[in-house]
Image (tube, rainbow, N blue to C red):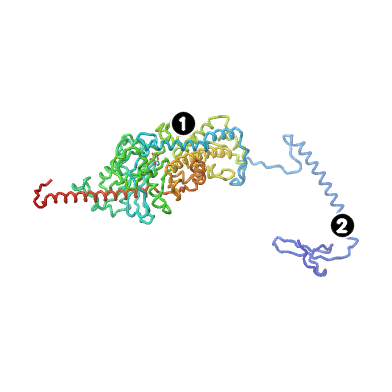
Amino acid sequence: MTAAATAPSSSPPGPGPGPQVEGDDIETCGGVKESRQAGTSAIHPSLVFIHLFSLAFLILVLTAQFFLTDIKFHYSRIFSSHPFSRTISSPPAVIVHEPVCESPQPFPTAPPVSRVHTMALAEETKRITAQFEYTDDDVNKGVQEFLRQMHEGLDKDGTSMSQIVTYVTGVPNGTEKGLYLAVDLGGTNFRVCSINLNGDSTFNLTYSKVAVPKELMVAKKAEDLFGFLARQIELFLKEHHEEHFEASIRRRQTISAEDGYEDEEIFRLGFTFSFPVMQFGINKGTLIRWTKGFDIPDAVGKDVCALLQQEIDKLRLPVKVAALVNDTVGTLMARSYTSPGKTSTLLGAIFGTGTNGAYVEKLANIHKPITGEYNQSTGEMVINTEWGSFDNQLNVLPNTKWDAELDRDSVNPGIQIFEKRVSGMFLGEIVRLALVSMLKDPKISLFRDVNSSSNDWKSTTTIAKDSGIFEQWGLDSSVMSIAAADHTPEYSILRQELENELKIYSASKEDAQAFKHVSCAVGRRAARLSAVAVGAIVLQSGKLKTDEDPIDIGVDGSLVEHYPFFRDMIYEALAVIDGIGPEGAKRIRIGIAKDGSGVGAALIALVAANMEKKDSADRLTTVKEEAVRKLSNVIPGVGEKTTLA
Ligand code: GLC
């Protein structure tokens, strides 16, 4: 403290006469500062005596205290071994026999203190993650095989990658307009939406979503599922388009119309059906096989548009199924409608529950026959690759024992092999199987409390009997996203998630670390495998050699949207592909096409409606020409005879 100003000694504020000390500030309880004043004065002899006496007394007291303490220490040591002993220096202790709270604070304030990763767990985690490594070399081998299987699928039917022709021969440019209905059956949910295309690359979308009841996913008869879908369309129209639902404009049965219905004032509906379908027209296609947990054998081989139209007609709804769309085709169309700049989109891809891609291929490269009508003027057609089934024969794809186990226990063993290593429906299960094999090994300390008992939460790791970790499909891939995103030093977010989602209580930091490493290895492999598909299609397009524009790719799906750095990991792998390299990778623009399938389906319904108009205009022209021809036969030329054909 600094010295305060000096004041006259005549008015000392101190308690009495005494040595004057240098002025000092003293903080009082009230925070007010008193000031001692500095000064000088002569020392009285009696004061010297008092000081000496006080000093001697102080020394005496201190010496006595020292001896007493020593005695107390010795006594306590001697008496403490005696059952009836008491220390002599303190009153008897009162022992309360009540539960004792070891942690007096309501919540622990310090993070758990963990030991270093126990060796067995660390080693085993390393051994497991190494098996999910997918090297640059693997990526390049994958691309070459992908290109080979793509060509095979363009040459003939019945190959592992179906390369389905879609009859969509152009992509939109953003100027399209109109109100359309779209429905989307792609996995666990069924969505119904109406889309207003505004013609300026924007749209308005109203939608409702309902979970598909599990029993309908494996129903006996196709009409059980499709009847349910039609009823959802009815509910949606009642709720959002009452005006179109009025009895006056319901579809009217009429003998004059070709299909028996008057098509005035009805909704054109784009049907996004995200399963492999052999298409033979813009609104016609037979189901090849079910994927993603669906299994209704009755529907296989049937035209899914007709199945839906039948159920719609039973309810007499003002709706015509105008276009059959795979979600990837919808994503491609939607991205093209909304994407910035003039570049048309090359590829629409889904990395969600399932994975697949649709791209624009030159008609000249499609060697298998395309039956039915389509517009040839663009020289292109959108191909639905069904890349989920790339390399079902396992020529190049990685196949750990957990991949094999997952496939063996799935509803479709030997099929969708690429999808089973890439998409959200399966990744969690791969992680789960790898963790279970660690759990089964008694030498591995995963979730065994070896670590957590040594931390200061004094908790015990427990896994509930009904934890998802013990159940097939019990580990949702969303936990992997949480794991990848948790960069907290103690993995507290992930550990909380393990409790909430998997009922694994009080996992240690090391458990969480092991979980994260395995999970990230599986996620990273999935992203690099995705790059194989994307990279192969970019190479197939030849765009890197010719165009200067960015190569535009629209993607959708929970994995690419929510898994941290999924796109970055794809880019990283694209940069190592021969023929792409870091420069090529920079030219590839991967953008999210949110809700792509709905908007895309509307756009394809629009294309279909235009085709219908053109069709009827063509038909009208043909009728007119025919009439003119007949009339010209009727009206004879000079000196000619006439007959009616
Ligand atoms: C499955 C389906 C495919 C769909 C993909 C993404 O792979 O077979 O048609 O596009 O999932 O939903």
Q: Is residue 616 left or right of residue 202?
A: left
Task: Find residue 261 and report its horizontal and vertical position in percent.
Answer: 22, 47
Task: Find residue 397 and report its horizontal and vertical position in percent.
Answer: 47, 34
User: Residue at point 83% right, 46% down?
Assistant: 64
The residue beneath circle 2 is 51
Q: Is residue 446 left or right of residue 84?
A: left
Q: In the image, what residue type sits under mark 2?
A: His
Determine the residue located farthest toward the right in the rendered image.
Answer: 45
Marker disc for residue 404: 1
Task: Point out the tag, 2 or 1, that comes first from the N-terminus.
Answer: 2
Q: Residues within 10 Å of mark 2 (few under 14, many from 20)?
A: few
Q: How many marks?
A: 2
Task: Find residue 593 and report its horizontal and vertical position in percent.
Answer: 42, 49
Dot 1: what SS?
A: helix
Q: Is residue 72 left or right of residue 115?
A: right
Q: Is residue 565 left or right of residue 75?
A: left
Dot 2: what SS?
A: helix
Is residue 474 something one can see in this rendering? no
Q: Nearer the viewer, mark 2 or mark 1?
A: 1
